[in-house]
Amino acid sequence: MADKIVAVVGATGSQGGGLCEAILNDRNGGFACRAITRDPDKDKARALASRGAAVVRADLDDRTSLERAFAGAHGAFCVTNFWEHFSADKEKAQARNLADAARITGLKHVIWSTLEDTRKLMAPDDTRMPMLQEKYRVPHFDAKAEADAYFSGLPVTFLVTSFYWDNLYTFGMAPKKGDDGVYRWTLPMGNSRLAGIAAEDIGKVAYGIFKAGRQYVGRTVGIAGENLTIDEMGRKLSKALGIGPIEYNPVEPDAYRGFGFPGADEMGNMFQVYRDFEGEVLGARSVDAARLLNPDLMTFEQWIAKNKARIPL
Ligand SMILES: NC(=O)c1ccc[n+]([C@@H]2O[C@H](COP(=O)([O-])OP(=O)(O)OC[C@H]3O[C@@H](n4cnc5c(N)ncnc54)[C@H](OP(=O)(O)O)[C@@H]3O)[C@@H](O)[C@H]2O)c1
């Protein structure tokens, strides 16, 4: 039987890239990778093509291009990239294009990479954090959650993801060394645990979901690699990298929102959700569920060992 084609949105990125790797590394797994990008000539796309992926051009802003990219496929992995534009409305419009294209092309299994609606955790008049973009608490969470509705009626699995540890080197979120030589990690997380994951494991879990097939259709799967406090993460980093102690500097979310880097208000709100609603956030994610779907799921220590050279410490 011919391999089932999975059309992978974000194939050149973290989540989709992990899924492409998983498919390409499992030659007899019964699935083929169709990697979607806006630019088939970019290095990452060429690398995927050289390893056997079919690389197809499409743009999330252009539904017709997505229909072409999904045509004839068994399934699609759908992800949007909020951080390219910082707009909840745009993220929702792109998600709608994905869902519409999946419906029109009659896909058998769609995975929508989503997050929870953080507005449900607080009353509308709760003043602990500002509303952003008029009506969101954490726009990149809430917009994805709103977009869940577009996928309704499709054979969809909602994949609720976690904080990538990879943010330490991709988003500049690693501890910083002060002029006094001491490493400090400034985050508004209090002593709450952060649901974290190696970004590549998200794609590997998605592959497990496609392989498991129908039993995951209509389900929401929340995943994490390990839930650790910032203090615990700092101790593991300092030990594994053989550097001095990392002092955790637990600032208030308001201070963090005021740091002024692009998206500081959004990140401040997000960490405050992780801090103030630890039980709800961790309860929506399961390390066991992730490991069942991806037996190679990494712990934070394993992730550090693999990514040592990239962590700027
Ligand atoms: N960082 C975290 O901790 C974290 C945690 C949970 C969820 N997330 C969510 O993850 C999402 C980003 O996923 P990622 O980290 O896998 O992305 P990424 O590594 O930043 O790469 C972005 C991917 O999206 C594709 N893309 C962006 N705009 C596109 C468009 N208009 N048309 C077609 N493809 C487009 C890019 O493809 P080309 O450039 O090749 O076209 C690229 O493959 C964000 O929405 C974020 O909220 C992040």
Image: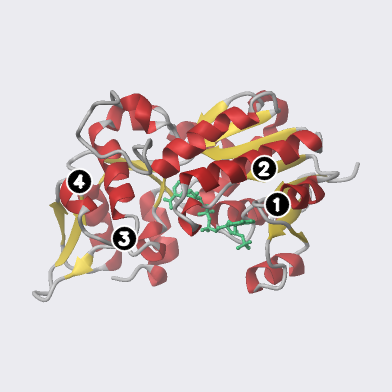
Instruction: Count neighbours of disc 2 (C-alpha within 10 A) and say few if under 14, some if 14 to 19, many if 20 or more.
Output: many
Of residues 245 and 133, which is closer to you in this image?
Answer: 133
Q: Which residue is mark 2?
A: 97
Q: Are marks 1 and 2 in contact (CB under 8 Å)?
A: yes
Q: Residue furthest left?
A: 180
The amino acid marked with disc number 4 is Pro
Badge 1 crowding class, 10 Å Cα cut-off, few under 14, some 14 to 19, many 20 or more, is: few
The answer to whether the residue bearing label 1 lies less than 8 angstroms from the nearest atom of ligand 1 is yes
User: Between marks 3 and 2, how big is the CA–CA gap?
Assistant: 32 Å
**The N terminus appears in which quarter of the rendering?**
top right
Q: Amino acid at mark 1?
A: Asp
Sort mark 4 into few (<14), some (14-19) or many (20+) by Cα contacts within 10 Å: many
The verdict on label 3 being within 8 Å of ligand 1 is: no
Above or below for 277 versus 247: above
Residue bearing mark 3? 173
Q: Tag 2, which secondary structure?
A: helix
Report whether 189 appears left or right of 106: left
- Which of the two labelled residues, at mark 1 and mark 4, occupies the earlier sequence position? 1
Picture quadrant where residue 165 is located: bottom left
Q: Amino acid at mark 2?
A: Asn
Q: How many marks?
A: 4
- Separation of residues labelled 1 and 2 (CA atoms): 7 Å
Q: Nearer the viewer, mark 1 or mark 4?
A: 1
> Residue at coordinates 55% horizontally, 34% vertically from top-left?
147
Does residue 197 sit above or below 52 in this rendering? above
Which residue position holds label 1? 62
Residue at the (37%, 51%) spot, across then down: 300
Q: Residue furthest right?
A: 1
In this image, 277 relative to 9: left or right? left
- Mark 4 highlights which residue? 253
